[in-house]
Amino acid sequence: MKNQTVKLDGLTDAINAAISQYSDDLIRDMPEVVKEAAQETVKELKSKAGSLFKGTKYNKSFKTKKQTGPNGITTYTVYSTEYRLTHLLEHGHVIKNQTGKVYGMTAARPHWQPAEEAGIKLLEEKLSETAKGD
């Protein structure tokens, strides 16, 4: 932002113009920042799942989907094409035989929650950088 001299009468208008320019820049850059954060979250999931579930198609099933709402706001969804497994692997589950006898539990293997937390943190950092003008 450039330095400018403003008379007291025009101070309100100058502040409003600066805020408007700042918000316009942030709104313009936000979709790209959100897209980058979503892609980084997918990379984090693939990395974590790759170490937990080697040799399965699950560790390659993470994707992003761009969605534009009726109000024109673009969002990105991080998802797995093997969504039926996600909850079972993340939280563990009961193991039963065909008669319903319970043999035990599988261990929970959290991979979504850490990736989500890292994605949120990354998004906040990128938005903060964008807001500062870096």
Image: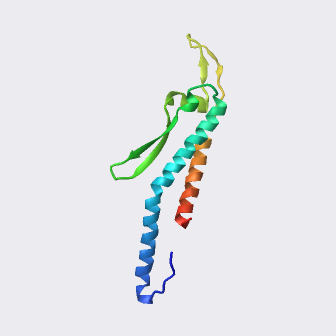
Residue at position x 47%, y 59% in the image: 29
Q: Is residue 115 above or below residue 126?
A: above
Residue at position x 56%, y 50% in the image: 120
Q: Horizontal and vertical percent for residue 61?
A: 53, 32
Quadrant of the rendering where the C terminus is positioned: bottom right
Q: Is residue 127 above or below residue 76?
A: below
Residue at position x 56%, y 13% in the image: 100
Residue 96 or residue 124, whichever sits in front = 124
Residue 15 or residue 105, whichever sits in front = 15
Q: Horizontal and vertical percent for residue 94?
A: 60, 22
Residue 77 shows up from this direction: yes
Q: Is residue 53 above or below residue 130?
A: above
Outermost residue toward the left?
A: 70
Residue at position x 49%, y 49% in the image: 35
Residue 44 or residue 88, whichever sits in front = 44
Q: Horizontal and vertical percent for residue 97?
A: 59, 13
Tell me where residue 85 sits by quadrant. Answer: top right
Relative horizontal placement of residue 113, taking residue 13 as reference (left or right) = right
Residue 110 shows up from this direction: no
Outermost residue toward the top?
A: 99
Tell me where residue 103 sits by quadrant. Answer: top right
